[in-house]
Amino acid sequence: MQATSPSEISDQRPLSLKIFMWVLYIFCRLLSSTWRIRFVGMDRRRMTVGTSPTGSFLIGIFHENVIAGLLSHENHQICNMVSQSKDGEIVDFIVRKYGLTTVRGSSSRGGKAVREAMIEQVNAGVIGAIAVDGPRGPRRVLKNGIADIARKTGAPVVPVTSYGQNNWILKKTWDQTRIPKPFSKIIIYYGEPIFVPKDAKDDEFNEYLTKIADVMNRDDDLVRLRFDDLWANARA
């Protein structure tokens, strides 16, 4: 299984869905064009690529931060794991319009196949991105997929936080989705890489999964609490 092609499924979409996708994409374009984005930790990202056995890594991001995370990485060589749901169909369309690729599936639908597809992409040197608590939560409770793929490929997990200084928060969603408001400052923070040994099993594997979760929560707090300092020293 490889990254999906948009031509494979576009003709099967109802007209109403196609129209909605285009309207939402235009909204995303207009919104993201107003954002001011700076990156922190790009030296770590480059170093990680240089030390990874695959020449790539796995981005671990909380589902609540996905919108800013995706729209801030236009035309990066990143393959995103996207669910097979109707919402996933919409995300897939927008992600591709931003010059990214996808593999389709989740922990609940097509789990084995999508892991194999992501492993293939990472082994080919493509950066993989996974919403670690998606697609249905619970919020900030990690599924084991990202650590399992890291273990099987040797590529590290890099926790990534995308944080807007001013956000809409969708409080009725399970993940408390954050959407940066127009003209927001946004920091994309690349954390320290976490390598999962290929022979990690059972308790040791779970320890690494817990470590990934702990680092992601720590980094999210760091960016939120030190936003102004990080912004002043970040690069555009």
Image (cartoon, grey):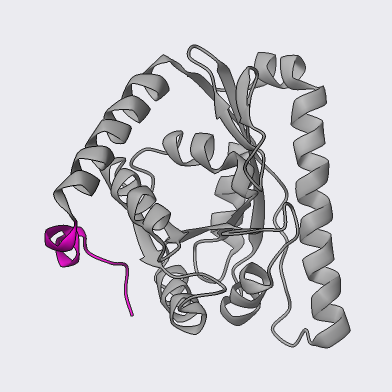
Farthest-out residue, left = 11
Residue at x-position 65% and y-position 18% = 165
Residue 234 sits inside the magenta stretch: no
As drawn, is 44 to the left or to the right of 207? left
- Using residue 162 as the reference point, say whether residue 113 is left or right of it: left
Q: Is residue 97 left or right of residue 68?
A: left
Foreground residue among 186 and 17? 17
Vertical placement of residue 146 versus 100, above or below: below
The percent position of residue 41, horizontal first and vertical second, equals: 64, 37
Q: For residue 176, what is the image quadrant?
A: top right
| Residue under the point 53% across and 18% down | 181
The residue sitting at 37% across, 60% down in the picture is: 102
Residue 177, quarter of the rendered image: top right
Task: Write down the region rendered in magenta.
Answer: 1-13
Q: Is residue 163 left or right of residue 80?
A: right
Judge whether 41 appears above or below 215 on screen.
above
The N terminus - image quarter = bottom left
Q: Position of residue 138 (x, y in %)?
A: 72, 58
Q: Compared to 16, does 227 lie above or below? A: above
Residue 22 in the image: above or below residue 192: above
